[in-house]
Amino acid sequence: MDDRQTTLTGALGDESPGRSAPRQRRAAFFVSDSTGITAETLGSALLANFPGIDVEHHTLPFVDGDVRVEEVLAEVGRAAAAGLAPVVFTTVKQASLRIGLSAAPALVIDLLGGPLARLEEAFGVRSSELPGAYHGLGDLEKYHRRMRAVEYAIEHDDGQSLRALDLADVIIVAPSRCGKTPTTMYLALQYGLLVANYPLTDDDFPTETLPGPLVRFAARCFGLTTTPVRLTEVRTQRRPRSRYASLEQCTLELRRAEELYRRAGVPFVNSSTKSVEEMSAVILQTMKLRT
Amino acid sequence: MDDRQTTLTGALGDESPGRSAPRQRRAAFFVSDSTGITAETLGSALLANFPGIDVEHHTLPFVDGDVRVEEVLAEVGRAAAAGLAPVVFTTVKQASLRIGLSAAPALVIDLLGGPLARLEEAFGVRSSELPGAYHGLGDLEKYHRRMRAVEYAIEHDDGQSLRALDLADVIIVAPSRCGKTPTTMYLALQYGLLVANYPLTDDDFPTETLPGPLVRFAARCFGLTTTPVRLTEVRTQRRPRSRYASLEQCTLELRRAEELYRRAGVPFVNSSTKSVEEMSAVILQTMKLRT
């Protein structure tokens, strides 16, 4: 079915059945003229496709001059000498520094170079070669928006305050320990959205509707659920052997929460198989909050 | 000096001096089989190099089957028909879907394809073609770590609690409104670090050392400062025409804070020209918290 897989596996050596081949060990360097976040994100996403290879990750940010390039080359050289056959992912923009980095004793993958050249051609203008991606006047406004969003999220975490609930872009509701708080913070920090969250406790469940303070804002509510086993596990870390953490209690609360979401027309997602980023993306998409 | 710049600018048309050329308008689509964060991050970083072009951004996450590919093609087609000459940045992994997307009436830039092929060659194994970057068993541990970090950050925000200060990976200190809270949350969410923050108020300045609760943890402290003008501006949004927001008060507090950092040997950074991501990267680097 898949000739290439077979060939490549075979190329690793003729191990006898039952004895596993030694795993490849590699060093990966994420090199950036700014924070390193883009290089790290894309480089890690690429490496995640090779689960059979053990990779040491190193992020080298603020590589913005010849001295820093020399430091990178030295560090990559040490990894190469240690037999770790390095891979360098770079998002450095300045041409002279990129040339310097290409001398590294490694597979050097320039994540910007190819796409930039194609964009230059399509746009008919040359790229600016400024280091860092997000400089300029937009920053201050973005900064204020995020600061306000994070403070709003802290104030309105776990139903602690209802002061400015009417300003919320979205209100995340769920039983305790379904992931409300990290998802709230992610949406606030990454997108500058005003996000409140509100716990569903036993008291809320006898009703046919959302908890009182939320009824007016039903259209902005988004629910989280999870699996009973997962919830028991997470709650056990907080209060071992409590009724709160028991499988019975978790099963009951999740069943009631899902019934409530359906009755109130609140969209919801199961957090047990999703990362914070994925839940945030689903919420943005469902609530049409993408800009 | 720069022939290419001249040629390309000229190619845009012979505008008479003093009259600016009409700006190019384009639509950009960030297409992913997962959250879209990687496509959005790298695509935006690439587009930021073309400040002269107005770009409408559209993120299309969870493109994981033929139906979603058709939806993308339809949406890109509408932008093309509206004269927005679309650019599609994609991180979709499955080969059949990538072929589908390549039919879009747009410049299609496959951010993964080229680098993946080079890694396959270097590693001698084929990539797994799993959608999404961060699945697998690592997730649950990472999730717990982040959840704990965000809750720790909320509890220890602005010196509100000192309960578990001894567990902090880093303690951010600064006068009010220098950016402690968003930076704290970013480090917690993105890196799962335990980060506390502590305000420097007038009362702390007469001393020669850090505020009492922090003295034991001086080696884990990191300071923020900013410019007096910036601080006045940010504080004015909170309390207009107050002594707190006055240029005199801001100048005084920042001068005293910087003196304190120097006396106590606390590294610090000026937040006025840095994004939250950049400050976080500097803190990780300085405090050797990169893993």
Image (tube, coloured by chain):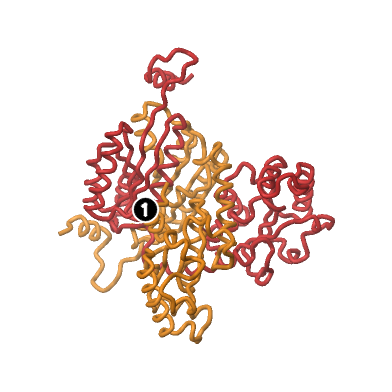
Chain colours: A red, B orange
The residue carrying mark 1 is B46
Furthest residue in direction left, as rendered: B1
Side of B184 relative to A101 (left or right): right
Against A1, residue A280 (above or below) is below
Helix, strand or loop for disc 1? helix
Q: How many marks?
A: 1
- Where does the image place residue B256, in percent across and percent down from the top left? 39, 77
Of residue B26 and residue A118, the one placed in the foreground of this image is: A118
Nearer to me, B223 or B164: B164
Query: In the picture, residue B153 is in which quadrant?
Result: bottom right
Which image quadrant for residue B114? top left
Which residue is at 69% across, 53% downward?
A: A223
The spot of residue B275 in percent (x, y) is: 41, 63
Q: Quadrant of residue A157?
A: bottom right
Taking depth in this image into account, of A217 and A67 the one nearest to the observer is A67
Label 1, residues with CA under 10 Å away: few <14, some 14-19, many ≥20: many
| Left or right: B206, with A272 as reference point | left
Question: In this picture, is A138 found above or below B131?
Answer: below
Q: Where is residue B86? Give x, y as percent.
A: 42, 51
Q: The disc numbered 1 marks a residue on which chain?
A: B
Can residue A125 be seen in this snapshot? no
A129 lies left or right of A182: left
Does the image show residue A130? yes
**Amino acid found under the numbered disc labelled 1:** Leu
Q: Is residue B188 above or below residue B208?
A: above
Q: Measuring from the top left, give residue B166's x and y in whole percent.
A: 52, 57
